[in-house]
Image (spheres, rainbow, N blue to C red):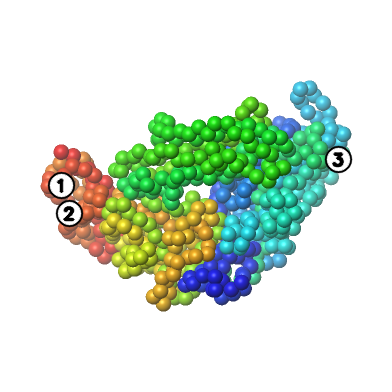
Amino acid sequence: MNLKKVFKFWIVLIIFFAFSPIEGKSQFKLTQASQTKSKITNNKSKSINRITLPFIDDFSNYLNIPNIDLWENKGAWVNTDYPFLAPTVGVVTLDALDFEGQLYPHANTTGFPADTLTSYKIRLDSTLLPTLTKLTPQDSIYLSFYVQPGGGIGEIWDNIGATPAKRDSLVLQFYSFSHNTWHNVWKTEGLRVDSIFAKDSTYWLFVNIPIVDTIYFNSEFRFRFLNFASLANNPSYAYVDNCDHWHLDYVYLNKDRRYDDRAIRDIAFVNPARSLLKEYQAIPAIQFRGEDMGDSLDIKIINLSDIALSSQYNYYVFNSFGTEVASYNGGFENIYPYIQTKNFQTSPNHANPPTNFSYSIDPNQWETFDVVHIVKEGVGQDSRTSNDTIRFKQVFENYFAYDDASAENGFGIQPIGVSNLALGFNLKVPDTLTAVDIYFNSTYHDANQKPFYLCVWNSLGGKPNDSIYRSNTYFTPKTEGLNQYTRYYLNSPLVIPEGEFFVSLQTKYNDYLNIGFDRNTDCSSKMFGNWANSWEPNTLFKGSLMIRPYFGYKSVIGLPTIEKEDINLRIYPNPTNSTLNIDLGENTYSNSNYNLRIVNMLGKEVYQSGFKNQINVSNLTSGVYILYIINKETKQTNQEKLIIQK
């Protein structure tokens, strides 16, 4: 398929699986992305006590590092966003990145060992409860798990993450204490989810391995998963980042099992909780309106048993003080076995619950709400309750976010020179744009470190129109951590009127840029590209660019900033009703290098002058303002919240 014929996008996208390009010329490119791995290593030593049967982990109630009471880990990570319709919410993923989110130093195109997930020592010599009993091969011990290759199902532009190449593999090994060796007991080569679905109408392989060799029946037994990855040859290193995803779920080791022992009495959520808003995952408090609320939710609930069960579903909304502000009771509904029907819960009371309320917030105050979803089996015999609760934190602060802060792929600007990639947002009231947070994927040999300008455009007919801002100097992408945004400050605050506006990245040279692209939320209708003075919409790739505009005086603690001058700005008294003192500290240039500017919460400038150590603000009405200190030479800006109280 020639992607140019699919949509007239100035920077057409190409998806890379295992770093392999698709045939056809293009201008946009979609790449694999780095994902959230913790920088904490597993340096905890397991106590001398061994794990006793049963051993089970469905990775549903935690993120990032695999459970340190069960696993020794080298590079694998727990997440909810990369799998496609997991058996239960949460999986552990093995890929081509190390703990720091960088490609392994020994990565190559022919194949290399990557992540390893190893169990702690498990007692296969005996059970302790209800009584001490010796274990033998006759006790029918099986290790089972679900496995899914990355990439999802369907057309390549719908895929999530990266599919392993055919030469790649996932391997299961058992440890023999007597021989001090690891033995291969199961292996699969790279494949697509489509091929799994074609055989069984499911999205996962179910693997069940009997343990029958007596060399494993001791207190030193262990098992481990490891993956072998490979980089494909690619004309641009800017496309070469994470690849070869393998997802594991519901790892279960126990006795008294059967070869076809697949059913387990467990009702569980499949997907993580999402925003209750129509478009955004987060929105500035001052911009929120009731019309931003979605009409209903898409909830996936599964019955993993082999009989129909009754379940109850509810959701609750709590404010930042822990007070319940809304709730929904979906009542009891029957849910039929996925093994038999290949369907999740179909009752709309559970699968599509309404959002029957609107958040009540002070537009001048930051607010967060916890949305908690709970599903329970009607008679209370669910074998695993950890996958019965999912949560979402709804943020009303000072930024817009379409994305969920997880880059399953990368969205790339191909080198065409002075090209723009734009993302649109809508203001209900005027506001002051001060910075933009962007996540750039880590790439092989740091090939993504190319200069760009930050631009802002007004809107005409739903497209970017006239440029209203372009940074005086260029920025260089920085990746401060996996899925960790970097903040790029405007040269000076920009008051934007009510209505739609666009933020864009403009390449300085003919360079690639690889921006984080979230595949679990979709703002594709707000994405536009421009070359040769022609803006064209994205009509093919579904997802959200990881670009977040920030407004007003508040910022995220600990977020890296780019080219931001560090001065010791202090204003006092604050609150005040007449005179305001301004102190820049000792480690600054001459005060004459700065200008002062005061803006109210609607983005309107109410004061402007050269720098003064003391100004009279008695003419300002009571309220919250932002005081800006602007360096005349560098155009860098510092700011403080100012309260006028009369």
Left/right of residue 56 with respect to residue 330 in the rendered view: right
Pointer 1: what residue? 620
The three-letter amino acid code for the residue at tag 1 is Leu
**Residue 235 sits in which quadrant?**
bottom right
**Residue 351 sits in which quadrant?**
top right
Left/right of residue 634 with respect to residue 311 in the rendered view: left
Q: As displayed, is residue 537 above or below residue 334?
A: below
Q: Which badge, 1 or 3, comes first in the chain's sequence? A: 3
Q: As displayed, is residue 307 above or below residue 520?
A: above
- Report if residue 197 is visible in the image: yes
Name the disc covering residue 212, or none.
Answer: 3
| In-front residue for pair 555/547 | 547
Name the disc covering residue 51, or none.
Answer: none
The three-letter amino acid code for the residue at tag 2 is Tyr
Q: At 81% across and 37% down in the image, what residue appears?
A: 258
Picture coordinates of residue 453, whole percent (x, y): 38, 67
Q: Would you say the residues marked 3 and 2 are in contact, meaning their CB atoms lie under 8 Å apart?
A: no
- Total tally of numbered discs in the picture: 3
| In-front residue for pair 205/105 | 205
